[in-house]
């Protein structure tokens, strides 16, 4: 286990969110894409600062951000809603709900992954 992960385990999720269990908005899905819109991190908590540093590297989904930060999705959504409210991030839908994946492409990817194992 990395030292950073050990530190994370010492902080309870409710401390990270300031005691809040729900985001200020219910617009974040696990596949919502997040993009940093501000370069300034002043006044942000350490978790929000780490989140912004991640998003500066390019668009990431809510699930990817939660995984990188080793935080539950619910905690990540609270942090993201705060950053959205303050104008630090913007969001985009990953795919329209009516779009269907290309089944042949998915089969080719699966075959490629199986071949590597």
Image: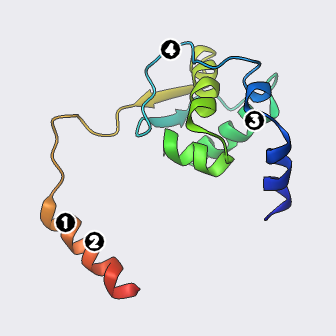
The answer to the question of whether label 1 and label 3 lie on touching residues, with beta carbons closer than 8 A, is no
Instruction: Determine which residue is flagged by label 4.
Output: 25
What's the CA distance linking mark 1 and mark 2? 6 Å
Q: Quadrant of the N terminus?
A: bottom right
Pick whichever of labels 3 and 2 is earlier in the sequence. 3
Pick whichever of labels 3 and 4 is earlier in the sequence. 4
Pick whichever of labels 2 and 4 is earlier in the sequence. 4
Q: Nearer the viewer, residue 19 or 76?
A: 19
Residue at the image point whose x is 41% and y is 86% from the top: 117
What's the CA distance linking mark 3 and mark 2? 34 Å
Residue 91 horizontal/vertical position (percent): 45, 29
Quarter occupied by residue 13:
top right
What's the CA distance linking mark 4 and mark 1? 35 Å
The answer to the question of whether label 3 and label 4 lie on touching residues, with beta carbons closer than 8 A, is no
Residue 27 horizontal/vertical position (percent): 43, 21
Pick whichever of labels 1 and 3 is earlier in the sequence. 3
The answer to the question of whether label 1 and label 2 lie on touching residues, with beta carbons closer than 8 A, is yes
In this picture, residue 85 sits left or right of residue 42: left
Label placed on residue 8: none
Disc 1 residue crowd, few under 14, some 14–19, many 20+, Cα 10 Å: few
Label placed on residue 47: 3
Instruction: Determine which residue is flagged by label 2.
Output: 109
Residue 73's place in the image compared with 77, above or below, is below
Secondary structure at badge 3 equals helix
Instruction: Determine which residue is flagged by label 1.
Output: 105
């Amino acid at each position: 286990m990395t030292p950073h992960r050990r530190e994370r385990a010492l902080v309870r999720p409710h401390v990270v969110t300031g005691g809040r269990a729900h985001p200020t908005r219910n617009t974040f899905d696990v596949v919502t894409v997040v993009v940093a819109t501000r370069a300034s991190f002043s006044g942000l908590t350490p978790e929000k600062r780490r989140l912004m540093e991640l998003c500066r590297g390019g668009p990431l989904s809510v699930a990817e951000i939660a995984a990188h930060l080793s935080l539950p999705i619910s905690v990540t959504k609270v942090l993201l809603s705060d950053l959205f409210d303050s104008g630090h991030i913007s969001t985009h839908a990953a795919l329209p709900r009516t779009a269907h994946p290309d089944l042949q492409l998915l089969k080719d990817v699966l075959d490629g992954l199986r071949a590597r194992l």
